[in-house]
Image: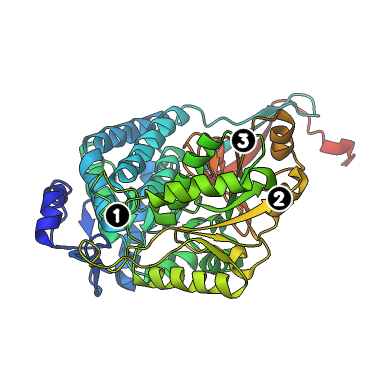
């Protein structure tokens, strides 16, 4: 095993990132507060124990929160463009560590090295975006209905932002939230997935030097590890905003818990994303979009393509092209650039994948490309599965669910309206796409009568969104938006100010109150 990891330079990457055998899991900037039980991180790539972190106890959490509260009082007074300058330096630091961090993401999470590097690139991109944003936190001015009055709105920092992130994007999702939150003047407390704690420790190590160099209080960036911290964040009245990425099931719990105390949430939950393949589609483009969408990250993106809705006239041809492409997929170590598909995160996910295939068959699904668990040399971790294709109907229970694995359901349609209805007819509403060269179909798909998702693409797959847009979706996806566009507004509180510079006190709405 050690040879395998050494062959891909993992030991060196870990050393560069300052990951020792045991890392103290809870830390604020440079300080550690971890006293809890040990969490072990095993690689799904080869089953090796990569490292251990200590979980945070309730006391550790309290200590971190005390640091966060203290830091907020200082950080909110730093002018926004100066906060942007700190984030700019973080982007520079991430550029330096792109290679080892990308390797660790690939090794601890299991996605391909290319995708691991792409994830770090998303972090760098959001830093650049946040730097510009730090000079553009604009509020509106309004004309008052009263004479000699001025009315405007300001955006103030909201406070402590809780970030609860998932294993599948172990570093990027944190950065979309934290980099934006920081330029907004907030401080962050991050609970990463317990499946990928080392990636979080590495991020903390990378930004630590920037915080220290600039005398920024360490509590600006707090890290708490272990599942216990999740509900501490959800229930904590000192945290006005919780950004949660994960399953719809846990998202429902987070949503209720935070709403109960009138906190705000940004929820990024499950997707059930479809591509409509029109009779007017360019089939070569469909091939790349659909196959990357369905098997990239081994089907573990919330934007993964889970359904292909294909026009009946091109159904046979599309299936043939897909079968051929799936036949050429190389499954294996994701650090080896010859492979297309890496492992699932753990054996629990492998079981979910197998169960989903059985359920689809029981409901009448027809196997087009057979699935199964890979065995033998190179697959010792037991987490490698074959991407499969199942002909199914949209109403099947299993098709209506999100299974975090490379299972692609395919189905036929006759009219474009029928295709749009099928695409929308699932509980989730994250990403969607149509492949067509017909402008009427394209515009209908993008219109208010078209896709009901937060993301709707034309001649592009469902995954791989850029950071410049607002990311998120409707219905059971949770309704949150993070990353680009004006998603920053969720990280600030709006204040409407009216100033009377006259000598009279006229009331609004013309109300008379004579004394
Ligand atoms: C996720 O799977 O949680 O659009 C995020 C994409 C990536 C982000 C996915 N930029 O596929």
**How far apart, in angstroms, are the residues tagged by discs 3 and 1?**
41 Å
Q: How is the image coloured?
A: rainbow
As helix, strand or loop, the secondary structure at mark 3 comes to loop
Q: Residue at x 44, y 27 (%)?
A: 132
As helix, strand or loop, the secondary structure at mark 1 comes to helix
**How far apart, in angstroms, are the residues tagged by discs 1 and 2?**
44 Å
Q: Residue at x 31, y 60 (%)?
A: 196
Q: Closer to the camera, 314 or 56? A: 314
Q: Which residue is mark 1?
A: 200
As helix, strand or loop, the secondary structure at mark 2 comes to strand
Q: Nearer the viewer, mark 3 or mark 1?
A: 3
Q: Quadrant of the C terminus?
A: top right
As drawn, the label of residue 307 is: none
> CB of mark 1 within 8 Å of CB of mark 2?
no
In this rendering, would 306 be left or right of 331? right
Q: Earlier in the sequence, mark 3 or mark 2?
A: 3
Q: Position of residue 229 (x, y in %)?
A: 38, 68
Q: Position of residue 59 (x, y in %)?
A: 31, 71
Q: Closer to the camera, 471 or 494? A: 471
Q: Is residue 453 visible?
A: no
Callout 3 crowding tier (Cα within 10 Å): few <14, some 14–19, many ≥20: some
Q: Earlier in the sequence, mark 3 or mark 1?
A: 1
Q: Which residue is mark 2?
A: 413
Q: Closer to the camera, 36 or 506? A: 36
Q: Which residue is mark 3?
A: 281
> CB of mark 3 within 8 Å of CB of mark 1?
no
The quarter of the displayed image where residue 395 is located: bottom right
Callout 2 crowding tier (Cα within 10 Å): few <14, some 14–19, many ≥20: some
């Amino acid at each position: 095993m050690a040879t395998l990891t050494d062959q891909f330079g993992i030991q060196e990457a870990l050393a560069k990132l300052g990951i020792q055998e045991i890392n103290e899991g809870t830390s604020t900037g440079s300080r550690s507060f971890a006293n809890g039980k040990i969490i072990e991180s095993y690689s799904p790539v080869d089953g090796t124990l990569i490292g251990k972190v200590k979980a945070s106890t309730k006391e550790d959490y309290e200590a971190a929160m005390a640091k966060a509260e203290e830091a907020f009082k200082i950080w909110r007074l730093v002018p926004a463009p100066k906060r942007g300058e700190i984030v700019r330096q973080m982007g520079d630091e991430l550029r330096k560590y792109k290679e080892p961090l990308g390797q660790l993401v690939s090794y601890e999470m299991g996605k391909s090295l290319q995708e691991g590097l792409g994830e770090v690139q998303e972090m760098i991109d959001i830093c650049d975006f946040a730097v510009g944003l730090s000079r553009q936190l604009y509020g509106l001015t309004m004309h008052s209905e009263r004479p000699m009055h001025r009315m405007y709105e300001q955006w103030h920092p909201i406070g402590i932002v809780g970030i609860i992130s998932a294993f599948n994007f172990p570093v990027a999702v944190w950065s979309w939230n934290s980099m934006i939150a920081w330029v907004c003047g907030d401080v962050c407390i991050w609970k990463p997935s317990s499946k990928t704690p080392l990636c979080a420790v590495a991020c903390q190590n990378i930004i630590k030097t920037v915080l220290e160099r600039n005398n920024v209080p360490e509590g600006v960036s707090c890290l708490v590890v272990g599942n216990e911290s999740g509900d501490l964040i959800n229930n904590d009245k000192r945290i006005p905003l919780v950004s949660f990425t994960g399953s719809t099931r846990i998202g429902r719990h987070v949503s209720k818990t935070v709403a109960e105390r009138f906190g705000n949430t940004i929820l990024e939950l499950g997707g059930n994303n479809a591509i409509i393949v029109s009779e007017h589609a360019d089939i070569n483009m469909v091939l790349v979009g659909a196959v990357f969408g369905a098997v990239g990250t081994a089907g573990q993106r919330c934007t993964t393509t889970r359904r292909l809705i294909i026009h009946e006239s091109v159904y046979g041809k599309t299936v043939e092209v897909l079968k051929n492409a799936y036949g050429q997929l190389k499954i294996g170590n994701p650090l080896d650039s010859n492979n297309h598909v890496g492992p699932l995160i753990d054996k629990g996910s492998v079981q979910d994948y197998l169960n989903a295939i059985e359920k689809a068959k029981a409901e009448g699904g027809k196997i087009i490309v057979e699935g199964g668990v890979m065995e033998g040399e190179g697959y010792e971790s037991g987490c490698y599965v074959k991407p499969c294709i199942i002909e199914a109907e949209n109403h099947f229970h299993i098709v209506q669910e999100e299974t975090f694995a490379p299972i692609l359901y395919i189905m036929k349609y006759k009219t474009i309206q029928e295709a749009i209805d099928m695409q929308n007819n699932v509980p989730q509403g994250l990403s969607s796409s149509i492949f067509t060269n017909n402008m009427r179909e394209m515009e209908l798909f993008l219109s208010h009568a078209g896709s009901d998702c937060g993301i709707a693409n034309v001649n592009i797959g469902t995954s791989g969104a850029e950071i410049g847009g607002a990311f998120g979706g409707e219905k059971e996806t949770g309704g949150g938006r993070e990353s680009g566009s004006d998603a920053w507004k969720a990280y600030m509180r709006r204040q409407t100010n009216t100033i009377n510079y006259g000598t009279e006190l006229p009331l609004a709405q013309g109300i008379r109150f004579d004394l």
